[in-house]
Image: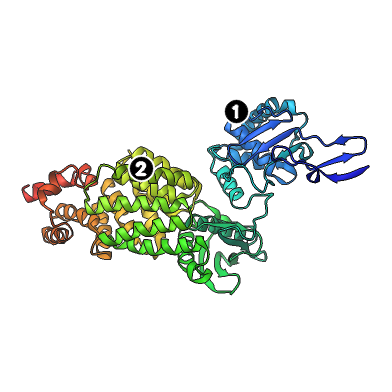
Amino acid sequence: MILLDFDDLFTIGGFTPSTCILGPVLMTETLLRIRFYGPFRAFDAAGNDVTPKSRKGQGVLAVLATGEDMLRTRRWLQDTLWSDRTPQQAGGSLRQTLTELRKVIGPCGDVLQADRNAIWLNPELVETDLDDPEPQSQTFLEGLDVRDPKFDEWRRAQCRTPMHMPLPSGQPGVRFRCVGDGSNGGVIGSIVADQLGHSLEEQVSSWVVDRQGDVEVKCDLAELGPSNVLTVRVTHEHTGTLLYSGFREYQGNASQALVAGFLAELVHETVGRVVAKLPRVLGLDRPEVVAAGFANIALNRLGTFETEKLNEADALFERAYAADGNGLYLAWRAFVRMAQVVDHNKEIAPDFLEEVEALLTKALEAAPYNSVALSLVSLTRNMLFDDHGTSIELAEMATRVNTNGLLAKQSLAVAASTDDDPQSAYHASRLCQAALGADGLRHLWDLYHALVCIRAGHLSEATQSAKRASRASPFFAAPRRQLVSLYLAAGDEENAKQTMEELKKLEPSFSLDEYFHDKDYPVLTLRKAGLLQRAAQILGQ
């Protein structure tokens, strides 16, 4: 008998069965074929579609087929697809899903097997397109949403480094290698490093790899008496250039570092510093690095809120997208358009909103699992279209995608502050303020915190935030509009008049009549909070 690779003989439909035995013609027959690229599908040997109908069923089949030896423990499956349920509920749901799977893929024979601890597929009877060098689609598990944040995390990891497909050396994207110090941090250090890698991927087209990359993200956890010290070092692997170094000390159990949101401040600071330095360290001969460079300059322009600089920011984000088709840059373009209208009280041309809608739609299509893009789309829909329902949904999705995403938390606070519980939104926004640290767009965060404070009735704190925002940029009109009414409500007519003079310089056509009575003037939050009416009464308007 001769053992031959079936690859040497032929391929069928893009799927390459592993082996066949020739002698008397005996073959290992593929009974189940699974397609991951494009819409998730499963087919029996005759080509009949045996894809489970439920999202959970598809999710279970997908994670089984990507596991080592196509095996997963029951506990892992429960934690990944039913993370929001009790162990008893998750176990019952898994059993129901297995019943569905056995029924739908039953014609494929003994492909699915299980015992008390684990569930697996027979690798000799299953083929996938994970090894296909040229899959029909580049989108992994297109359209599959099982509505669980743990599954979303698993899916993003597969998108970055497909399990059975080595990343070609010429593949575009910054390569981040994320490691933990085994002597101290161990598992926790590795998880924190991976979280940083995920957040870096949201800011620049990149991959998390398990071998030498462009940049090493290293985390270590050391126990020093009652305290734990988490250290982070990010270096350029080739030259050893230090991109970031920092630490956080905290009390209590070491696993506290993994509590949702605990790392938000460290992640935000690390990612901002690293992305700003990448173009200088990696050079400008790679499209993803060129795009990151354009985006860095665009954010500086955006932060001025000067009319011409906003136009430049839009053009730079457009160039970033042209260099590297990352949907994040489309989301930033839409956000800049929103800022041009809201901050400068710009008249909206008939086709303007259609252009912004198109940018938002394309951004979500190109970056559906990027929490930064989701947050920007949420803020834009909220501030420009007054679409609070969609804004909340997008912001909630952003927080599920990245539990340590600070912009996701802030966008959710802004969107939720219009709901029935503005106090919860206020406390969430305060946490963002505390975790923000140094940020080139700090005044934009201050503006949003002021909005949330106004809606929650914390007017003194709103005044302080709006003052910080206005001091940071002489061209920033939005916080000055807030301050006019906030000063008047506090009886500070002198500062209110001074702020009105500043507004007149930014808006030559500014008038109190427009400010108080024009429903299209961008002070909707002040109007809904009753501050405009109070201010108008004080001035006898």
**Residue depicted at 22% across the width and 57% down the height:** 477
Whichever of labels 2 and 1 marks the residue nearer the N terminus, that label is 1
Residue sticking out furthest to the left: 540
Q: CA distance from mark 2 to mark 1?
A: 32 Å
Q: Residue at x 13, y 61 (%)?
A: 501
Q: Is residue 482 above or below residue 126?
A: below
Residue 280 vs 207, above or below: the answer is below
Rendered residue at 50%/65% (across/down): 248
**Percent x, y for residue 118?**
73, 39
Q: Which type of secondary structure does the marked residue at label 1 adopt?
A: loop
Residue at disc 2, secondary structure:
helix
Picture quadrant where residue 230 is located: bottom right
Judging from the image, the colouring scheme is rainbow
Q: Quadrant of residue 89?
A: top right
Front residue of 201/435: it is 201
Disc 1 residue crowd, few under 14, some 14–19, many 20+, Cα 10 Å: few
Q: Which residue is mark 2?
A: 357
The disc label shown at residue 53, or none: 1
Q: Amino acid at mark 2?
A: Glu
In the displayed structure image, the side of residue 517 where residue 188 appears, left or right: right
Towards the viewer: 111 or 34: 34
Residue 481 lies, with reference to residue 93, above or below; the image says below
At label 1, the amino acid type is: Lys
Q: Position of residue 144 (x, y in %)?
A: 56, 37
Please tell me which residue lies in front, 293 or 456: 293
In percent of width and height, residue 323 lies at 47, 58
Q: Is residue 508 left or right of residue 42?
A: left
Name the front one of labels 2 and 1.
2
Residue 393: assigned label: none
Residue 124 visible from this viewpoint: yes
Q: In screen coordinates, is 368 left or right of 194? A: left
